[in-house]
Amino acid sequence: MGIANVIKTGFRIVYDLGFVTGKAGEGEFWSAFRQQTGIKGSDQILREEILSRFTLRPWMLEVVRSLREKGVIVGILSDQTNWLDELNDRYNFFQYFDYTFNSFHSGLSKKNLEGFEYVLKKINVNPEKVLFIDDHLSNIERAKVVGMRTIHYKQKEMFIEELRYFFSIIV
């Protein structure tokens, strides 16, 4: 099984089992993952293989910091397991955000409109005042359905230009 198929299988399992929404545990995930991919290794080793590949974009955190300094409310809406908390323990990036919504804790995913509706209710903001940024087109499409403005992230330069359209305060 090639690396692309391993990644695709991992994403499918994390959603199908409900690990991403906190309905299944990590042990269940790794058991199904091993069974479907043939990959061996302890839960801890496999977890570290994933977490070690997480890359913070310092320039993105600088954009977030700059927006917050200008009074813009910023947040994370993540379809992630409890690993997001572990990554924050390592890198302390939650501090840059006013809100952090993680599907693992809310039980709601960006794969469903309810995940977006939940966030809008929690932050009590009209959807047309929310700019949702994501690298998955399907998530962008769902955000548009609930009335959010969107940027489909593809690469840095294009993203900065699109962000300037919404926030002239970005330099």
Image (cartoon, rainbow, N blue to C red):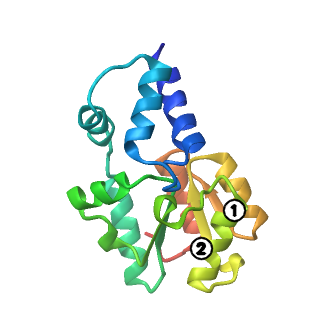
Q: Which residue is mark 2?
A: 119
Of marks 2 and 1, the one in the foreground: 2
Q: Secondary structure at mark 2?
A: helix
Percent x, y of residue 45 = 24, 32
Which amino acid type is marked by label 2?
Val
Q: Secondary structure at mark 1?
A: helix
Percent x, y of residue 149 = 68, 68
Q: Is residue 66 above or below residue 21?
A: below
Distance in Å between CA atoms under marks 2 and 1:
11 Å
Nearer to me, 109 or 151: 109
Q: Is residue 54 above or below residue 122?
A: above
Q: Which residue is mark 1?
A: 143
Residue drawn where x is 60% and y is 65% of the image? 132
27 sits to left or right of 76: left
Q: Quadrant of the C terminus?
A: bottom left
Which amino acid type is marked by label 1?
Ala
Q: Residue furthest left?
A: 90
Q: Is residue 5 above or below residue 18?
A: above
Percent x, y of residue 82 = 38, 55
Percent x, y of residue 70 = 42, 84
